[in-house]
Image (cartoon, rainbow, N blue to C red):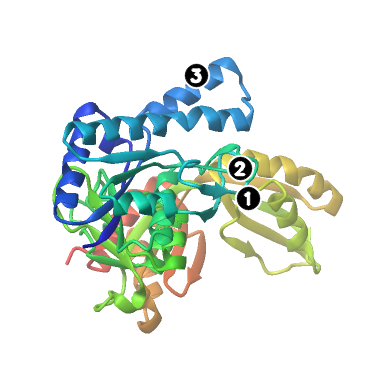
Amino acid sequence: MALYVEKYGGTSVGSVERINAVARKVSAEVADGHQVVVVVSAMSGETNRLLALANEINDHPPARELDVLVSTGEQVTIALLCMAFDAQGMCARSYTGAQANIRTDEVHGRARIVDIQGDAMQADLDKGRVVVVAGFQGIDENNNITTLGRGGSDTTAVALAAALKADECRIYTDVDGVYTTDPRIVPEARRLDQVSFEEMLELASLGAKVLQIRSVEFASKYAVPLRVLSSFEAGKGTLITSEENIVEQPIISGITYNRDEAKVTVRGVPDTPGIAHRILGVISDQHINVDMIIQNISEEGLTDFTFTVPSADMAKSIKVLQPLVKELNAHEVVADDDLAKISVVGIGMRSHEGIATTMFKALSEKGINIQMISTSEIKISVTIRKEFTELAVRTLHAAFELEK
């Protein structure tokens, strides 16, 4: 007998027929002797509908009340799914985030889980019941409803798997696993049987949208085996696990891309100690994430300082930097959001040379100019013009022979 925590996203429970299909699948697993906790999202489109309603009422709805509103989407799903289990002769019990004792911090809209008390859920499992939990939500120390942000149901599932010491956490979605790259760009892309936590963290942070990055962080921290599977077709999916559990470590596991990149440059700043801190300090104060950073060689005591931010934060970055430019007597601040970031990721990089050479040569042969470069032990990222995104992905996928 095994204990599984299974998460079903919005498309997986997007209709009565699909909710019934989930109930039949889970009932069959219980009949085989397994214990199952099901974590569900709101039905597809429901969260957007609720947000649209809120914005019709108030252009800037209070964060606390917005969480109260959007959390109802998952509450609908857990009730309907438990009704489906009952109709199929299976005993199930629904839990909201509060009823499941999913305790979070007090940050509405992007709360973080701090504790889960799973005793009540475990008692239901031991009685042969299916436990159905609302994803994406919790409760803070003042008993306010909180939500975990987009994709937060993945994090709920992994956190429950850790708390209940589940044998595996299974994320059911509309794709059948993690691929070497986006199959819409490269039809020859392969589904990976296994990926390390570290690789998946890089892939998720660099543009792969299969899993929410916080769910992977949670799985890595608590060593929860995490499997991505399709809700609509049978298969083994992709197992995300510890590096030591992966028998054959590929040099490169995947190619990712992100078109949501903007480059901000402060030109002609004094090349003095602390200048990077002053520039990035005002950016950090606005809770803007900075990725790549380059500082040019100083000429006549002046330098250019360049960094990348999400495209949505480009205008805000310029606005908060302009007063600093005047204060520092720098030349100007300029920005460009016609960029894409392309990354190659693989734990095999640690023990193989020439990865960067292969990457840069392949791009240059296609006339693709590299603007910025960032590296870590297991990834190399470059920024290029946005128009070359798909060509770069196809070129690198072929250069590293990932279709084999």
Q: What amino acid is at disc 2? A: Met
Q: CA distance from mark 3 to mark 2?
A: 28 Å
Q: Which amino acid, mark 3?
A: Leu
Within 10 Å of disc 1 (Cα), the crowding (few <14, some 14-19, many 20+) is: many
- Residue type for callout 1: Val
Which of 301 and 120 lies nearest the eye of the viewer?
120
Q: Which residue is mark 3?
A: 53
**Judging from the image, what secondary structure is the residue with disc 1 in?**
strand
- Is label 3 or label 1 in front? 3
For label 3, the SS is helix
* First-in-chain label (1 vs 2): 1
User: In what quadrant of the picture does the N terminus appear?
Assistant: bottom left
Q: CA distance from mark 1 to mark 2?
A: 7 Å
Percent from the top left, x then y, of residue 112? Answer: 55, 50
Q: Which residue is mark 1?
A: 264
What secondary structure is marked by label 2? helix
Above-or-below relation of 301 to 121: below
Tell me which residue sits at (21%, 44%) in the image: 231
At horizontal 63% and vertical 48% (from top left) the residue drawn is 288
Q: Position of residue 323 (x, y in %)?
A: 81, 44
Rounded to the nearest angstrom, the CA distance separating label 3 from label 1 is 36 Å
Say above or below: 71 vs 373. above
Q: Position of residue 3 (x, y in %)?
A: 28, 59
Give yes or no for contact between labels 1 and 2 (Cβ–Cβ under 8 Å).
yes
Residue located beneath label 2 in the image: 314
Quadrant position of residue 169: bottom left
Quarter the C terminus occupies: bottom left
The reply to whether discs 3 and 1 touch (Cβ–Cβ < 8 Å) is: no
